[in-house]
Image (cartoon, rainbow, N blue to C red):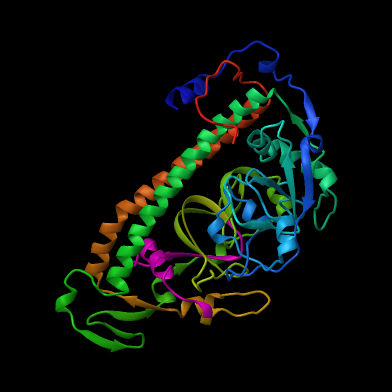
Amino acid sequence: MVKLFSILSNGFKGDNAMAKGKWNRVILREICDSVKYGYTASAKSEPIGPKFLRITDIVPNHIDWSSVPHCEIDKDNLSKYLLKKNDIVIARTGATTGYAKRIRTKQHAIFASYLVRIRINPKCNSKYIGYVIESDEYKQFIQLNIGGAAQPHANAQILTSFPIPLPPLPTQRKIAAILSTYDDLIENNTRRIKILEDMAQTLYREWFVHYRFPGYENVPMVESELGAIPQGWEVKKFGGVSYNFDRLRKPLSGQVRSTMQGEYPYYGAAKILDYINGYLFDGRYLLIGEDGSVVTKDGKPVLQLVTGKFWVNNHTHVVQGKSPISTNFLYLFMSNVTITSYITGAAQPKINQENLNRIPVIFPPENLLEQFENTIQPNFENIIALNLKNANLCQTRDLLLPKLISGKIDVSDLDIDRDSTI
């Protein structure tokens, strides 16, 4: 793997036709075995059926299957809409028309009606085709060909009219293997992030939910509005232990964002929606879903703990901890709060700032907060470093991708000892 990165960093100087980007192109639909529109149903948070993949689930860099909802479907339709590994789904409506994802793992899932699913002929490498369709070149092509002013859209005919650069199958496999190397590293880092966060969450619950903090044996329990709490602890309101920056939020339409493409993440209520060339915030913040995606299936708030420069729309609260409460502590606290009683609206769930600010927070002594922060800080520092590595890996992969799929980097002599045919 080190050798592979070294070669790619130095670049190839091939002078053959392929290295000059002269691969033939074929229309996407010509290499599709099937093209199908998705299933119409209502998403359910309860696990009452298969996962129900939607447009919002395929916009981020990777599909977070843990956040994908479910839906009810009968057996006959299940077989029609069931996703298979290496299927490719493409958004056909809205600001993200043309966004696509290849299904990288086996999932018990179907796809929603605003997606189109394509299956690639076995004579081509699905991984390679997936990377091409996920590329900016494909998105830009679709954006130039979509219809609709108020609501952009593209039918299957348009979505499959893209001219795919098609090198020989062995070269397709090599390109897919190179790009998969970056994705494998990103997924490995993501798993490490999950472990580090789970460790911090476990310690938080041990100290501040079960009250088994250092020296707890010598601290009597007293009654409070939240039940029995250790003596010397207080109950405060969320608004009293946090700073709110909602007034600085500024939503941008998909059309505007398409003219501002760049490196800074643009956050919505539940995830990154885009990357643009400007930012509103710079630092460590907790984002709490305000409307739309505000609650998880187990009744917890939708949270994003972010660091660095970013933009945010008006569908998520932007907060920081107020000393001695840290933003890390605030995140762990909110991760363990059930917020269903603070949500208003049936058709469009919402947790407004007033309701958010009245959530009771158990406030331990300052010395215990400091001890806890010192204990968990290395975990969060490692998480920040791993997220930065992932961002750099994504950027490198995305810069490399057009050079590989155009043939500007010659991989014909590269020996890749990994199975890229799956």
Task: Identify the residue at image location x=29%, y=69%.
Answer: 206
Pinpoint residue 140: horizontal percent, then vertical percent.
Answer: 74, 40
- The outermost residue toward the front is 75
Q: Is residue 4 above or below residue 71?
A: above
Residue 134 in sight: yes
Q: Residue furthest left?
A: 218
Of residues 87 and 335, the one nearer the viewer is 87
Residue at image location 63% in from the left, 69% down from the top? 292
On the rendered image, what quadrant is the N terminus found in?
A: top left
Horizontally, residue 269 falls left or right of residue 327, namely right
Instruction: Determine whether 236 is above or below 143 in the image.
Output: below
Which of the 4 image quarters holds residue 174? top right
Q: Position of residue 56 (x, y in %)?
A: 65, 57
- Asked whether residue 19 is drawn in magenta, I would say no
Q: Is residue 47 above or below residue 361?
A: above
Residue at 61 percent of width and 57 percent of height: 108
Residue 102 x %, y %: 64, 44
Magenta residue span: 312-340
